[in-house]
Amino acid sequence: MIKEYPETHLQKLRIGIHKETIQLVKIHNEYNLHSILHFSTNIISFAILSGYFILSNEKLVILNSWVQELLYNLSDTIKAFSILLVTDLWIGFHSPHGWELMIGSVYNDFGLAHNDQIISGLVSTFPVILDTIVKYWIFHYLNRVSPSLVVIYHSMNE
């Protein structure tokens, strides 16, 4: 069958295959470059934010005192309601689609290829880990600061 085609047609076919191969290599290199750029951008952003938090400790102390004053002036019922609202909205197990979107977005931001198995694994474990951390914080910290808040929280949670 190859002998039936003239030599110029075979040469055009080789040139077409060569051009297509070069285009595929360019696409692959572009994808790798974007992955490296995403990762390096995230590292640089993390370094800048860490440096800002370390160097501007004075501003953080002022912000911390303002937030503490605001929170201590609230009643225990409002505090417990706020904790329940925030944990249910952010850590709620009832919103797996929202978790898929957030984790998928972070996953893509690091330049990783979309993988449904990894994302579904993170969706099933990450909220549980966050919920455990929040409950530990409630028992460890809030029991010392405001035991009545913990009692109200548990009665509202049930």
Image: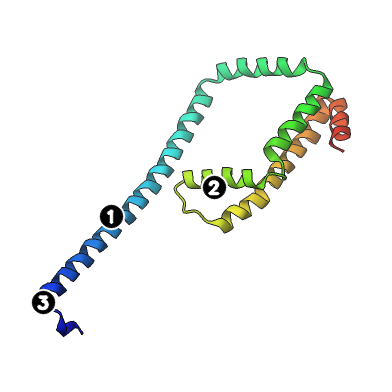
User: What's under tag 3, amino acid-wise?
Assistant: Glu
Badge 2 local density, few (<14 within 10 Å), some, or many (20+)? many
- Mark 3 secondary-structure assignment: helix
CB-based contact (under 8 Å), mark 1 and mark 2: no
Q: CA distance from mark 1 to mark 2?
A: 26 Å
Badge 3 local density, few (<14 within 10 Å), some, or many (20+)? few
Q: Which residue is mark 2?
A: 104
Question: Comparing marks 1 and 3, which lies closer to the viewer?
Answer: 3
Give percent across and percent down for residue 150.
84, 30
Q: CA distance from mark 3 to mark 2?
A: 51 Å
Report which quarter residue 4 is drawn in: bottom left
User: Mark 1 or 2 closer to N-term?
Assistant: 1
Q: Quadrant of the C terminus?
A: top right
Q: In this rendered view, identify the residue nearer to me: 61 or 40.
A: 40
Q: Residue at x 56, y 16 (%)?
A: 59
User: What's under tag 2, amino acid-wise?
Assistant: Gly
Q: Is residue 65 left or right of residue 81?
A: left
Q: Quadrant of the N terminus?
A: bottom left
Q: Is residue 29 left or right of residue 117?
A: left
Give percent across and percent down for residue 133.
72, 40
User: Mark 1 or 3 closer to N-term?
Assistant: 3
Q: Which residue is mark 3?
A: 7
Give percent across and percent down for residue 2.
18, 82
Badge 1 local density, few (<14 within 10 Å), some, or many (20+)? few
Question: Comparing marks 3 and 2, which lies closer to the viewer?
Answer: 3
- Mark 2 secondary-structure assignment: helix
Q: Which residue is mark 1?
A: 26
Q: Residue at x 88, y 26 (%)?
A: 148
Which numbered tag is attached to residue 120? none
